[in-house]
Amino acid sequence: MKQSMTLEDVGHTRRTYGRFYREVIGGGFVPPVSMVNNGYLHNLNASFDGILLRESRATSLLQPQQPVNFGTIQPCVRNEDQRSQRNSPLHLSLFEIFGYSRLDFIPMTPQEMAEKTIDEFVKFYTDYLRLDPALLRVYYFGGGTLREASKGKIKNDQHVGADNFSRQIWAGHGIHYLVAEHSNETFLLHLGEPVREHHSGYRNDIFMRVGDTHYEIATLNFISHQTQIKAGEIVGISPLPFYLREMAMGQERILAAMQGSADIYQLPFVAPLVEAVNRKIRDGETAKVFTDALRVVHYVISDGWTYDRLQGAEHERHRYELNGYVRILSEWSSAIGRGEFLRLLRQNAELQPWYPKLEASIGQIIATVAEYRKRTQTKKR
């Protein structure tokens, strides 16, 4: 594995994913949706769901209007990563996903979906990224009831059979570090807030060994059912009239593994920013939290989402989450000074030349932080 990585290496890997998708999967390679979208209504989460709705010209995830096949490199903020950012160097608040979704209305079993998707993942991992399959560790669903898989959150004892078919497919590729698991991680059940009907099905969680560390790099979904809701609770699952299969690989995580590291703060488009912040904020963990907040706010604002646009009850959660990140920037940008904050924003844009919109939004970031500071000071009076 490569022991150091440059910005050009990152660009090459991004282009390699695009080439893999076009050569192996087909379909359209599409621009991502913004972090405020109709896929995840209540989070700053630029999800695949939002792209699926857009590309299939649908208003419901459960009623797509046409077959769709897309690949993308998708920015994302996830709640579990936000909770981890203060105590784990393995998570950034902002990360990106190499991935694709394939949806069609022809009959296909989970077994058939698994065979195609695993074959495609292994091809990308070995033939395109040139990585060693012996480093992989794969979790698959070992069978159980919905109640067991959701740790009691679903009050239903409907039994779901073990995913022995994906285990056999992985073994056929020479992957032998296979672990039967019995939770929502390997049988996908949407348990978000608010609870809503959602796709469900078998899932492979894929980890990669780097030194003495195993950390997650990808998930594969073989979607065949939907959750059913009654009185605000998920009560069961029922078959879907279409199939949906997906691959999602964490770009930052696989890049870190490719340079032999388990710390994504060492990536070439993150490490220089962390180092610059650390010269002004001496505490290492606080510097990482500030860097996370800067990257999230910079990306969200560059997508055009300002407080003026995030109005009304439908955006209450978005405003709340954005405020959390802006608060961090407001507190520490006062301490480091406006000029230094501006230099850090420019550096973040320069470190990601594949996102030219970051440079164009720097003035709006400064204005957003100033607006937040003014509003909070007015409330204190």
Image (spheres, rainbow, N blue to C red):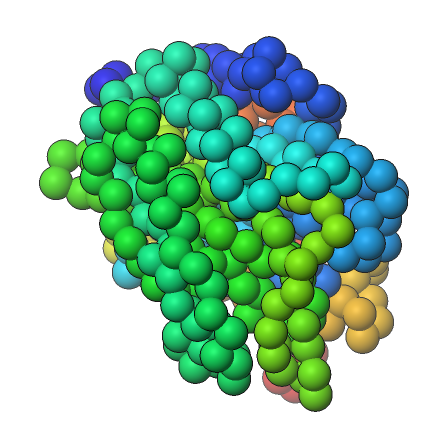
Q: In this view, does 209 lie above or below 205?
A: above
- Please tell me which residue is depicted at 28% across the width and 60% down the height of the picture: 87
Residue 349 rendering spot, x and y as whole percentages: 57, 30
Looking at the image, which is closer to me, 277 or 121? 121
- Please tell me which residue is depicted at 67% across the width and 72% down the height of the picture: 228
Indicate left or right for 247 with 126 as reference: right
Residue 176 rendering spot, x and y as whole percentages: 22, 35
Which of the image's four quarters has the N terminus?
top left
Looking at the image, which is closer to me, 95 or 159? 159
Q: In this view, does 230 lie above or below 32?
A: below
Residue 24 rendering spot, x and y as whole percentages: 57, 16
Residue 254 rendering spot, x and y as whole percentages: 37, 31
Indicate left or right for 237 with 120 as reference: right
- Please tell me which residue is depicted at 25% across the width and 21% down the height of the picture: 132
Extreme residue toward the left, this view: 212
Indicate left or right for 277 with 115 as reference: left
Q: Locate residue 259: give its quadrant.
A: top left
Q: In this view, does 21 lie above or below 180?
A: above
The answer to whether residue 333 is visible is no
Indicate left or right for 95 with 135 as reference: right
Q: Is residue 177 above or below residue 120?
A: below
Which of the image's four quarters has the C terminus?
bottom right
Looking at the image, which is closer to me, 166 or 23? 166
